[in-house]
């Protein structure tokens, strides 16, 4: 499945981020803890260069708890500061400012030596669309300063937000990369709502998600939808079986798979279905695609 979604405003965002790079001291990369690989924009490494980086594992409350720990350990071994957080409940947010200052401890000491006491730390916050970036910033700033909405591509221009006298955040629009070379990445982004549902066939998307969950978390699928997570079954067969169990039937006894698709995606994205991580760190079993 060749998914391409690169609106014009994303090209402008890249340009703006490059222009602002000289002003910032640290880059915060917000990623979705459920898909830590797919929700990382590979272009950010080139854009951010050697700026110190803090990885925020957002939506960790919706991700597998054990996998959250594994992913946090893996990112730390790559040399990043890591903050597990949940932008909706505010969990972990209180540790944001201390973590930023810890990451820049040596830089702050150099400023102090030069007499630049009280110089504000300037932080750029980046991430793919709909990863919870604006909601996270609002939690950090304790007010609705950044536009937040549960659909991709709402934040369109740069916004500087003062958290306190010593910390300023630059909110940037969500940015994808021009083409997903690995179709699994595009699918995982679509499962979580980071790309618009309209660019994909809904039932194909839901079938893929059902199959992936059945392989990684069979007990949850069996408990929730009362079906057997048969590893030999086709993805669409599992979706159809779940729809039949739910009683989603149309004329002639046919299963309304479109309705079941909407239910599955809504329950997955909202966390009603449970806590899932769809990808494993490179030092462990690889995620199914």
Image (cartoon, rainbow, N blue to C red):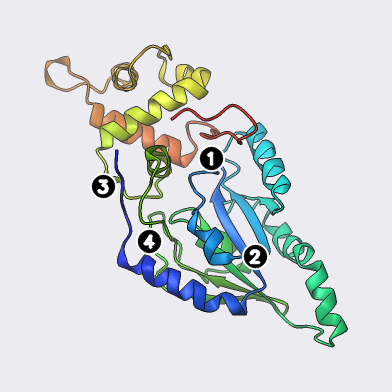
Could you tell me residue 107's position as x and y percent?
A: 78, 73
Query: Which residue carries the number 4 mark?
Result: 153
Query: Which residue carries the number 3 mark?
Result: 199
Where's the C terminus, which quadrant? Answer: top left
Query: Which residue carries the number 2 mark?
Result: 50
Where disc 4 sits, the SS reads loop
Where disc 2 sits, the SS reads loop
Q: Is residue 114 visible?
A: yes
Q: Earlier in the sequence, mark 1 or mark 4?
A: 1
Instruction: Quadrant for residue 71, please give it.
Output: top right
Residue visible at 66% across and 58% down in the picture: 54
Residue visible at 46% across and 16% down in the picture: 222
Query: Which residue carries the number 1 mark?
Result: 34
Residue visible at 65% across and 65% down in the picture: 50
Q: CA distance from mark 3 to mark 2?
A: 35 Å
Label 2: how many residues lie within 10 Å, few (<14), some (14-19) or many (20+)? few
Q: Is residue 259 above or below residue 234?
A: below
Q: Are marks 1 and 3 in contact (CB under 8 Å)?
A: no
| Disc nearest the viewer among 1 and 2 | 2
Q: Earlier in the sequence, mark 1 or mark 3?
A: 1
Q: CA distance from mark 1 to mark 4?
A: 20 Å
Q: Is residue 110 above or below residue 181?
A: below
Instruction: Quadrant for residue 121, please give it.
Output: bottom right
Q: CA distance from mark 3 to mark 4?
A: 14 Å
Label 4: how many residues lie within 10 Å, few (<14), some (14-19) or many (20+)? many
Specify the farthest residue to the right: 113
Q: CA distance from mark 4 to mark 2?
A: 27 Å
Q: CA distance from mark 1 to mark 3?
A: 21 Å
């Amino acid at each position: 499945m060749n998914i391409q979604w690169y609106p014009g405003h994303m090209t402008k965002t890249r340009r703006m981020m490059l222009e602002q790079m000289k002003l910032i001291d640290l880059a915060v990369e917000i990623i979705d803890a459920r898909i830590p690989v797919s929700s990382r924009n590979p272009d950010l490494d080139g854009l951010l260069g050697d700026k110190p980086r803090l990885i925020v594992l957002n939506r960790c409350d919706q991700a597998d708890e054990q996998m959250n720990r594994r992913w946090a350990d893996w990112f730390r071994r790559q040399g990043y500061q890591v903050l597990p957080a949940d932008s909706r409940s505010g969990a972990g947010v209180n540790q944001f400012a201390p973590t930023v200052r810890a990451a820049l401890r040596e830089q702050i000491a150099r400023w102090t030596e030069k007499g630049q006491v009280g110089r504000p730390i300037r932080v750029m916050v980046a991430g793919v669309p709909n990863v919870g970036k604006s909601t996270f910033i609002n939690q950090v700033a304790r007010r609705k300063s950044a536009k937040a909405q549960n659909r991709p591509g709402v934040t369109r221009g740069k916004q500087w937000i003062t958290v306190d006298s010593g910390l300023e955040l630059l909110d940037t629009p969500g940015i994808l990369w021009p083409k997903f070379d690995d179709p699994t990445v595009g699918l995982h982004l679509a499962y979580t709502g980071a790309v618009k549902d309209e660019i994909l066939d809904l039932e194909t998307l839901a079938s893929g998600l059902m199959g992936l969950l059945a392989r990684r978390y069979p007990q949850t699928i069996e408990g929730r939808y009362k079906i057997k997570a048969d590893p030999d079954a086709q993805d669409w067969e599992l979706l159809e079986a779940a729809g039949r169990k739910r009683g989603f039937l149309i004329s002639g006894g046919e299963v309304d798979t479109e309705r079941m698709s909407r239910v599955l995606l809504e329950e997955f994205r909202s966390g009603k279905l449970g806590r899932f991580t769809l990808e494993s760190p490179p030092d462990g079993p690889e995620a199914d695609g």
